[in-house]
Image (spheres, helix red, strand yellow):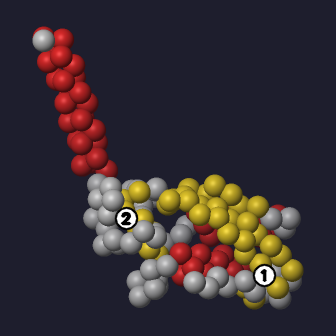
């Protein structure tokens, strides 16, 4: 019986330690959708709005640098973590200049609020991948819901 009590005590201590860590990392987010939320998508909290907004940010960065994109394809994959931080998982294109522009744009994205799940009653990590096709400096594959 003492062994069971010790085991339970250890388990409770681990849970207490975990909850203390979560308290330190916890930030306030308003998003309660299953899709991460980026600025300008508050009225349309969909994955298509998020992806199109990020695609537009990359295209705007190319325009700021006065780089003309004639016929380019870029594959992007990002991870939005439960704490709101982001990681670039994939940034692939045959155009090295576009790859650099995309990396810089993705590294300096505005805050993205993480996805929320009612099932777990918490914010969760979510990754997503898509292709960006640009012809004559125009995004030609805008994603629609």
> Residue at 23% of width from left, 41% of height from top?
20
Q: Position of residue 136 (x, y in %)?
A: 83, 88
Q: Which one is nearer the viewer's eye here, 141 or 53? A: 141
133 above or below 27? Answer: below
Which one is in front, 131 or 84? 131
Residue 67: x and y in percent read 79, 80
Q: CA distance from mark 2 to mark 1?
A: 32 Å
Residue matched to label 1:
134
Disc 1 crowd rating (10 Å Cα; few below 14, some 14-19, many 20+) is: many
2 vs 1, front mark: 2
> Which residue is drawn at the image coordinates 86% and 80% (left, top)?
71
Measured from the top left, where is residue 84 in percent x and y? 42, 61
Residue 90: numbered disc:
none
According to the image, label 2 marks what residue?
116
Q: Which quadrant of the structure image shows residue 104?
A: bottom right
Spot occupied by residue 16 in the image (x, y as percentages of width and height): 20, 36
């Amino acid at each position: 019986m003492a062994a069971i009590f010790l085991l339970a005590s250890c388990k409770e201590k681990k849970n207490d330690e975990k909850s203390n860590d979560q308290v330190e990392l916890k930030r306030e987010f308003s998003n309660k959708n299953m899709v991460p939320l980026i600025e300008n998508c508050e009225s349309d909290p969909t994955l298509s709005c998020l992806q199109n907004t990020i695609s537009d940010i990359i295209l705007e960065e190319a325009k700021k640098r006065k780089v003309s994109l004639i016929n380019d394809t870029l594959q992007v994959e990002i991870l939005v973590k439960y704490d709101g931080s982001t990681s670039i998982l994939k940034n692939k294109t045959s155009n090295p200049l576009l790859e650099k522009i995309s990396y810089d744009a993705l590294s300096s994205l505005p805050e993205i609020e993480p996805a929320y799940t009612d099932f777990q009653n918490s914010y969760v990590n979510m990754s997503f991948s898509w292709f960006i096709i640009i012809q004559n400096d125009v995004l030609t594959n805008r994603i629609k819901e």
